[in-house]
């Protein structure tokens, strides 16, 4: 089983749609969680950290469920510019290694 | 602005040659940096953890004698791909947390696209 697993995608949605991505992790001792965005042939960029109580940043909402070991990302009112690959990342205890999911591709169409 | 700088952005080399990639933290000190590799349409795979002043820690399956890592200062880590082969062609990306807090996210360099002919 992979340490971090994501929805396979791709997700094809119209502009204005709401889309949700899920990600599960296997290490129950994981401490920190993040969502990154990666554009084609570019480096990943931090989208947002995920906090235990859930957090929101504009159109983006992240949730953490420690009991079920999954994190989610909700994008509301999708824009064309949201088209990218979304990576969830989990930081393990000790050594501060960050493990990434395989990513979910999102295509937002006019 | 960028907090981690990586150079070069792309490189083409012949089989058997070595390639050095530099990763710098721009406005903070990074005692630890992480090197990832990403093949087309695949995820980021952690190769090694670069530790300032000590040996790097390699992930299982990564050859330490082929991928030499040096972290001689608090702002610079280098990855040298030795005796490169076409199968080493990939996107190499370095990263560092801005601080040592457990919840500090990684910031990435812009990556190096290596093509070995």
Image: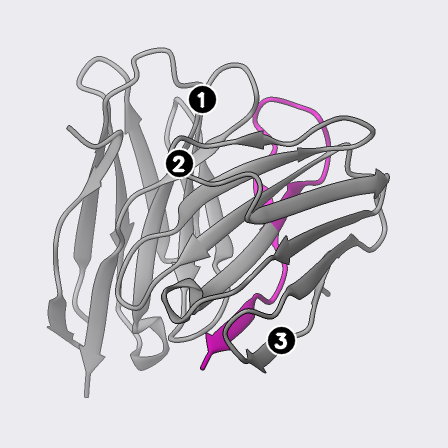
Which residue corresponds to mark 1? A92
Residue A106 as seen in the image, left or right of residue A40: left
Residue A20 as seen in the image, left or right of residue A33: left
* Residue A39 location, quadrant: bottom left
**Does the segment drawn in magenta span residue B109?**
yes
- Residue B11 vs B79, above or below: the answer is below
Residue drawn where x is 55% and y is 62% of the image: B83
Estimate the x, y position of residue B52 in percent, counting from the top left. Answer: 79, 32
Q: Mark 1 lies on which chain?
A: A
- Mark 1 and mark 2 in contact (Cβ < 8 Å)? yes
* Residue A88 location, quadrant: top left
- Residue B22 vs A21, above or below: the answer is below
- Residue A58 in sight: no
Which residue corresponds to mark 3? B9
Estimate the x, y position of residue A103 in percent, counting from the top left. Answer: 27, 54
Which residue corresponds to mark 2? A99
Q: In this view, which residue lies farthest toward the bottom?
A: A110
Please rate how many residues cluster around mark 2, counting C-alpha atoms within 10 Å: few if below 14, some from 14 to 19, many from 20.
many
* Residue A100 location, quadrant: top left
Q: Which chain carries label 3?
A: B
Please rate how many residues cluster around mark 1, counting C-alpha atoms within 10 Å: few if below 14, some from 14 to 19, many from 20.
some
Q: In this view, which residue lies farthest toward the front?
A: B16
Q: What stretch is highlighted in magenta?
A: B95-117
- Mark 3 and mark 2 in contact (Cβ < 8 Å)? no
Estimate the x, y position of residue B80 in percent, counting from the top left. Answer: 65, 56
Quadrant where the C terminus of chain B lies? bottom left
Q: Distance between the residues labelled 2 and 3?
A: 23 Å
């Amino acid at each position: 089983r992979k340490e971090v697993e994501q929805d396979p995608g791709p997700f094809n949605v119209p502009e204005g749609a709401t889309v949700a991505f899920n990600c599960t992790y296997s290490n129950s001792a994981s401490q920190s969680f993040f969502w990154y965005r990666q554009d084609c042939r570019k480096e990943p960029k931090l989208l947002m950290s995920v906090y235990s109580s859930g957090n929101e940043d504009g159109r983006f909402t992240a949730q953490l469920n420690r009991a079920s070991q999954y994190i989610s990302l909700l994008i509301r009112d999708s824009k064309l510019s949201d088209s990218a690959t979304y990576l969830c990342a989990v930081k393990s205890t000790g050594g501060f290694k960050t493990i990434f999911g395989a990513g979910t591709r999102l295509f937002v169409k006019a | 602005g960028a907090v981690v700088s990586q150079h070069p952005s792309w490189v083409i080399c012949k089989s058997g040659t070595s390639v050095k990639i530099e990763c710098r933290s721009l406005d903070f000190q990074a005692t630890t940096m992480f090197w990832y590799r990403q093949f087309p349409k695949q995820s980021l795979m952690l190769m090694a953890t670069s530790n300032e002043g000590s040996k790097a820690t390699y992930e299982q399956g990564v050859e330490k004698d082929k991928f030499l890592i040096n972290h001689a200062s608090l702002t610079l880590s280098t990855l040298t791909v030795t005796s490169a082969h076409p199968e080493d062609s990939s996107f190499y990306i370095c990263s560092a947390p801005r601080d040592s807090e457990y919840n500090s996210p990684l910031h990435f360099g812009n990556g190096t696209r290596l093509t070995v002919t």
